[in-house]
Image (cartoon, rainbow, N blue to C red):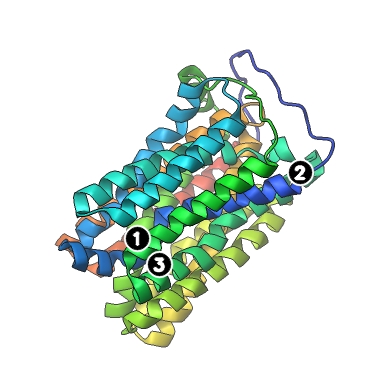
Amino acid sequence: MTTTEQTPTRTRQPETPAKSRWTAVSAVTLGTFLLVTAEQLPIGLLTSVGSALSVSEGTAGLMVTVPGIVAGFAAPLVPMLVGSLDRRVLLLGLMALMTVANLGSALAPNFAVLVGSRVLVGIAVGGFWAVAAGLAVRLVAPPDVPRATAVIFGGVGAANVFGVPLGTLVGDLTGWRIAFSSLSALALVTLVALLAVLPKLVASQAVRPKLLMEQLRNPGVRVGIIATALLVFGHFAAYTFVSPALQKMSGIDERYVGPLLFGFGAAGMIGNFVAGAALSRHVHRSVLTIAAAMTAAMPLFLLLGRTAAGGAVLLIVWGLAFGGVSVGLQTWMLKAAPEAVEAASALWVAVFNLSIGCGALAGGIIVDTLTLQSVLWLGGACALLAALAIRTARTNDAVR
């Protein structure tokens, strides 16, 4: 990818690690695992929470919408507000907030309080992810950066493989409050791990509004932002309601939704590492392939997912495609803005999480007012537009 000329900004470049800190990478991966699990766990609990607190499935979707939107604003605001604060201290503080937030969800007496606790989850998710997304270059030697990035984002796939399905299973067996309590305990474990192995991380540069806006002059960053918004919005408009889709469209019993989400996550984890390997050779081609696969996966669910077997197979294909989205688009952003990694990452995380929230919100409105099938058409259409934007980037030489 090429970059446009950046306005001179006083920066303090971090030292390039001579030796890779893989234990620190592992702790950050545990953090991304927790973030995604905490943000997406309500997807598997919509029916039980809605029933327990007397709200519709569309309204229960606010448990995904609210933290997504809050995280979108928190991603650039948290780094700006803390200035040059040691990023190690910041990450520890945000993980402590995550511990408290999930405990609040577990103890919530009504839906309003539950949504309020999800606001705190959104702050923790946005702030942590904005910093963690670019940490590979701070923790490992240059030759190890692509692999470390894939490992860190492997936490996303692992959350879908283990976190969300196991959380859903715990919720089904013992109640949704126990599921949120378990998240709080995991956040505490993650906090201890980060405290033990994370090195001092001096801020490379203060993230200011001007620096964020400068990134939008970069054509590679602009395309990355557009593709992120479209792919993530479309995915979460549909995937937030995958549980009722599997039950109502494919005729799958609610007891099997958790195991199927496990399969979705396992496929996503494979997709993450396959994409990581491909991205080291061809960034543009790899991201375009991911977008094209997403374009096909969601509409095909409508055509071939009318049976239990068809629904299960299409869910796995969908998971394989979406597994490459995070690592693919983050690698795109790192390549597009190598001199402003934290600023570009903060902007990307903001758009990513706003798209999660807005996608879930739009999906909830569509499900409540139109049909469940409509969100799958919307997801496919958004992915198609993303693929066209990525293709245009090649045509306009925004990417090498």
User: Disc 2 vs disc 3: Cβ atoms closer than 8 Å?
Assistant: no
Q: Please state which of residues 104 and 306 is positioned toward the viewer in this rendering.
A: 104
Q: Please state which of residues 384 and 16 is positioned toward the viewer in this rendering.
A: 16
Q: Which mark is residue 21?
A: 2
Residue 18 left/right relative to 369: right
Q: Is residue 18 above or below residue 8?
A: below
Q: Is residue 371 above or below residue 34?
A: below
Question: Is residue 394 visible from the viewing direction of this image?
Answer: no
Going from the N terminus, do you reach mark 1 or mark 3 first? 1
Q: Please state which of residues 237 and 159 is positioned toward the viewer in this rendering.
A: 159
Q: Amino acid at mark 2?
A: Arg
**Tag 1 secondary structure:** helix
Going from the N terminus, do you reach mark 1 or mark 2 first? 2
- Which quarter of the rendering shows the C terminus? top right
Q: Amino acid at mark 1?
A: Pro
Q: Position of residue 266 (x, y in %)?
A: 56, 70
At horizontal 60% and vertical 19% (from top left) the residue drawn is 6
Give the residue number, with chain letter if any, for mark 3.
Answer: 298
Q: Position of residue 378 (x, y in %)?
A: 32, 59
* Residue 49 lies in quadrant: bottom left
**Tag 3 secondary structure:** helix
Give the residue number, with chain letter if any, for mark 1.
Answer: 42
- Which quarter of the rendering shows the N terminus? top right
Residue 241 left/right relative to 5: left
